[in-house]
Image (cartoon, grey):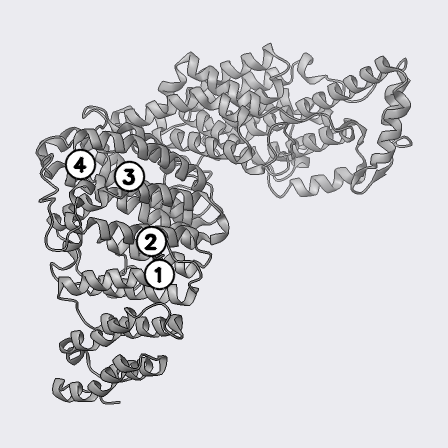
Amino acid sequence: MTQIDNPKIAFAYLRPACVLLTREPTVANVETLGGQLRELDDATLQQLQEYVLFPLRFVLRLPAAAPHRERLTQSVVEAMSHVLETTCVRSWDTLRELLSELCLCLASPRDPGRPAPGVSEELKGAVLRCLSALLHAAYGDVLPRLYEPATLPGLGAAVSLLLALGEAEQSREVQLGALGVLLTLGGQCDCGVGGGEEHAALGEEERRAAGGAMASFLPGITVALTRLVAGDPRHGHAVTVRAIKVWYRTVALVMGDAQLRGAAPGGEAGDPGGGPGAAPRAGELVVVRSPDWVQGAAGRLALLLKRLISCTAAHRHWRVRLELVALADHLLEHCGRSLGGECMGPLLEALVGAVNDEEPRVRERCEAALRAAAERGRDGCHGDAAGGGPPPGPGPSPGQTFVEVLSENLHGLATSLPRLLRAADDHGKLLALNVFLGYLKLLGPLVGRALNSAAHLQRISMALMQVLELDVRDVRIVEERSSAAVMETTSGAASEDPLAGHAQRKHFLYFRDEKIFSVLMEICRTLGYYGNTYLLVDHFLDLYRESSAYRKQAAMVLNETLRGAAGVGVATWGQGSGGGGGGWGLHAPAEGGGGGGDGESVRAAVVAVIEEYTSERNWNLATAPQHPEAPQDRELLSPSRLSISPGGINSSSLLQVVSSSSSSSSSSSSSSSSVHQLNSNIWQLCIQLEGVACGAHALGPAFRPLLMTSLYPVLEKAGDEALLVSRAAMACVHGVAGACGYASPRQLIADK
């Protein structure tokens, strides 16, 4: 269809529809005018913009009692959206008046900062799209005039209305639209991200004016958006992502180092008196971003930031976690000095916690952000000279390097780790352990400095001992007995993977999530890879010998430490699990180029651990009731007394046993105690057998000289009555055979 490109013809064509609409404001007349507007080309419509907007704005000003008011308003707004999407707004008065009129379509008559009740989602969506088109259409220096002190009352009402719509609405479309308009209102539209045409960005001076204006509303914006992110998750991940983006873009606009460095204290606000039509006392809304104001704002933002990070660091959707990484990267880059140490710690923790994210895109983005932060940290000592002096507000000392900040954070986390692991739920434990693991990987060989401190090593080891405590209350562990059929099946399964077979499923007292155990084992391997092998093995062997309460946990840590010391199963920056590596590249080159112990230290550690495991006092443990004078033990554990079903022990049978034995409280207590002790012995032997396989896997073919002393005790346990022990022993044999280069256990035994 040919479009009208002659302004005179277009004027004559549109005039009857415009006149009719002012006389008879109906939906049909609005739709007629809207259809005619689509027949004009963009240049012609630009020349007639004010003329065609007049009747549409006239209808918007009609009293609320007009017939079919809501449907009529929606039609008018949709027609205005078409005009604004295809033209530029060159008049400040047009921008100011249209912004006010569109906001009044949704605002409560009594409170312009709150949405009116009963407005349909369709009308809200149409008005928000029109507001977005209006702000995008602002041309040249028209939009920056929104940030003058005289306009702050109206701008504040618009911000309040958009925040209320974004926070309280049930419609995701309305929430996303309101947050998008709020982002554009601050001159930070992300319209180019989705493939659309990106409009001109604000200049440096214009951004400074926008930052000064938005500083007046920073508390309200950040508090409301934090509530939205931490609130009902049913609004969907897209709303959460957009809210996080508005949060950190607004903070960076107001608290940006470049803005604060260039603005003279007290001189950024301009004339608070405003111009014609300015609200009386509008100057009282102006915020001067003085050093004291910046320091106070940073302290309040730190509290909100911690809450926001805690709600999103382990979010189920990867896009939310990705946006959290973007938040940390953006604020560290643009506000590293103004936000100061109070915010830098949580921001670095957010990045470090995402180092081990299960989503590759989050990990890649996190690694890029950490590299950039490390680079800025190295150059931090020289930044002030290049920038013309330090910015106002708090911040880390210029001499404090990025690595020093990370080391301080690691020390602080190591101090609080035992308390966090005692008090937190599974979600909190996983979050704390992921952050701790991230610091270990990030610091690389510099971790050794922390481990050289006896106090920090003690705190770390105590945290591991507490959280790794096994649940040994299950009666079935003692009751189950091995059989030839089970042994055959287990052997076949174990031969597929030397390590898969000896990883018995364990149940822990203080967590249920398997991810927590996986992270704990990776922490142990990373400590072994970057730490001093002799120091770690001696420390955990001392715990193993001194306390029966910590023996099983210490053995688990030792097993993974041996693997880590050999570089087995350690994931470093840019590498997958199983490779070695040179750390994360944040340490000085002279500090060392990698991790893991040398071959001799690893071999000495393996020998010491296996000798301790296979010593008579730790190897010859009872795994079944062996005292004839205690028939109640055998009776309690006999299949005739316990009805075993495929799903486990029948609860009614167990209750009968308990009730029948309640007549003798001392006998019952003794039986329960002996069952727990036997369970503990079984698990200790299983973990020690796993340790033999881990030692073989750490040394590889170099383990062959140790076969003469270690293989016989392992084969002896393969015939143990306890099913878990025999399974672990057979899996250990397969693991040792594979690590030493034998095709099968049969070949291993024949060779020896």
SS assignment at label 2: helix
User: Which residue is pictured at 43% across the width and 27% down the height?
Assistant: 529
Foreground: disc 2 or disc 3: 2
What amino acid type is highlighted by mark number 1? Leu
Q: Is tag 1's residue or tag 4's residue first in the polypeptide sequence?
A: 1
Look at label 2 and name its amino acid.
Answer: Leu
| Mark identifier at residue 95 | none
Q: What is the crowding at mark 4: few (fewer than 14 residues within 10 Å), some, or many (at least 20)? A: many
Q: Residues within 10 Å of mark 1 (few under 14, many from 20)?
A: many
* Marks 1 and 2 close (CB-CB < 8 Å): yes
Q: Nearer the viewer, mark 1 or mark 4?
A: 1
* Residue at the far top in the pictured view: 546
Q: Earlier in the sequence, mark 2 or mark 4?
A: 2
Residue matched to label 3:
371
Within the image, what quadrant is residue 633 found in?
top right
Q: Residue at x 32, y 40 (%)?
A: 328
Instruction: Please name which of the two marks, 2 or 4, marks the residue nearer to the observer.
Output: 2
Callout in the foreground (3, 1): 1
**Residue identified by numbered label 4:** 289
Q: How many angstroms separate mark 4 from mark 3 (CA)? A: 31 Å
- First along the sequence among labels 3 and 1: 1
Where residue 177 sits in the image (x, y, percent)?
35, 59
Q: Which image quarter: residue 306?
A: top left
**Left or right: 516 in relation to 626:** left
> Which mark, residue 161?
2
Residue at 68%, 25% in the rendered image: 683
In the rendered structure, which disc, 2 or 3, sits on the residue that comes first in sequence?
Answer: 2
Measure the C-alpha gap from mark 2 to mark 4: 25 Å
